[in-house]
Image (cartoon, rainbow, N blue to C red):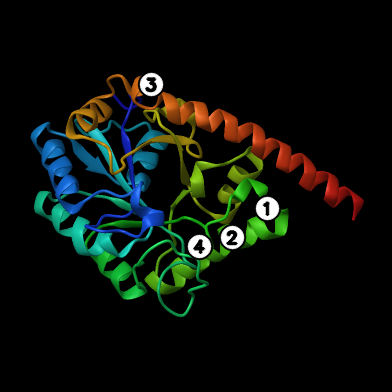
Amino acid sequence: MSGGPVPILMYHAVGHAPARAAYGLSVSPEAFAEQMWLLHGFGFTPMTAGALAAAWREGRPLPPKPVLITFDDGYEGVHRHALPALAEHGFAATLFASTGWLRGRHDTGGALDLMLDWDQLRELAAAGVEIGGHSHTHPQLDQLPEDRLAFEVEHCRELITAELGRPPVSFAYPYGYSTRRVRGAVRAAGFSVSLAVGNGMAVRRQGPYALQRVTVRRTTGIADFERMVEGRAVGRLFARDRALTKGYAIVRRSRQAVRKASEARV
């Protein structure tokens, strides 16, 4: 079957003692290794975001028990801790880089913890990790005016292309927020697939620019992780997250209305 539900796991920092700002959405190296062993033992087949999108676009069958392992932002611990665990099982993964947060000449500041540098990003790519975009400075894209939105998406893609020698095909929305306007900007920039959050299973009918993911965080125990990847009780696991998301959506729509009114007066 090519259109069944697929768990797309969303990770951020992987480390023993991440910075306070990154702690809640982090996992320990030991927890990450245990989770990878569970995927291995349960017979899951990790894919990249680009591979999943291509298979669904072309109507090709997916491998047995597909799963996506994704990392947002570009924390240094992905190279230090996650890469060895992935390599141990031969697992594919996708990392979405906020290019202005990475250490090096494009660094704009604002990162929450120690980030990858560009050499480490190239090493991840050489090891088979797909590198996707995650904006340049990690803003809420749906709150930006047109010119700034285009810059965040296009400049991110330009930098990854220049530094890695190939254009990224995948993108993930910072904070998971997107609108039709944001999705259009991502598509216009040349990305062929983009991931949101939603805390649900990804299915083909969501379309290539709104695929849902499930959040793996510091408090995710192995039993809940098993339920998550098996697609059991996902709604219950993320009931609070979904309620908060609905509340945030109301706030963001109000901000958008204020922004549009301000632009109309200029």
Between circles 4 and 1, the one closer to the viewer is 1
Between circles 2 and 3, the one closer to the viewer is 3
Where the N terminus falls, by quadrant? Answer: top left
Residue 133 in the image: state x and y as whole percent: 46, 57
Mark 4 neighbour class, 10 Å CA radius: few under 14, some 14 to 19, many 20 or more: many
Work out how far the residue at label 2 is from the one at label 3, CA to CA, in angstroms. 32 Å
Question: Which sits earlier in the primary sequence, circle 1 or circle 2?
Answer: 1
Question: Which sits earlier in the primary sequence, circle 1 or circle 3?
Answer: 1
The secondary element bearing badge 1 is classed as loop
Question: Which sits earlier in the primary sequence, circle 2 or circle 3?
Answer: 2
- The amino acid type, in three-letter code, at marker 4 is Arg
- Number of numbered discs: 4
Mark 3 neighbour class, 10 Å CA radius: few under 14, some 14 to 19, many 20 or more: some
Q: Nearer the viewer, residue 187 or 38?
A: 38
Between circles 4 and 2, the one closer to the viewer is 2
Looking at the picture, does residue 178 appear above or below residue 76? above
Question: Which sits earlier in the primary sequence, circle 4 or circle 3?
Answer: 4
- The amino acid type, in three-letter code, at marker 1 is Leu
- The amino acid type, in three-letter code, at marker 2 is Glu
Which residue position holds label 3?
A: 235
Which residue position holds label 4?
A: 157
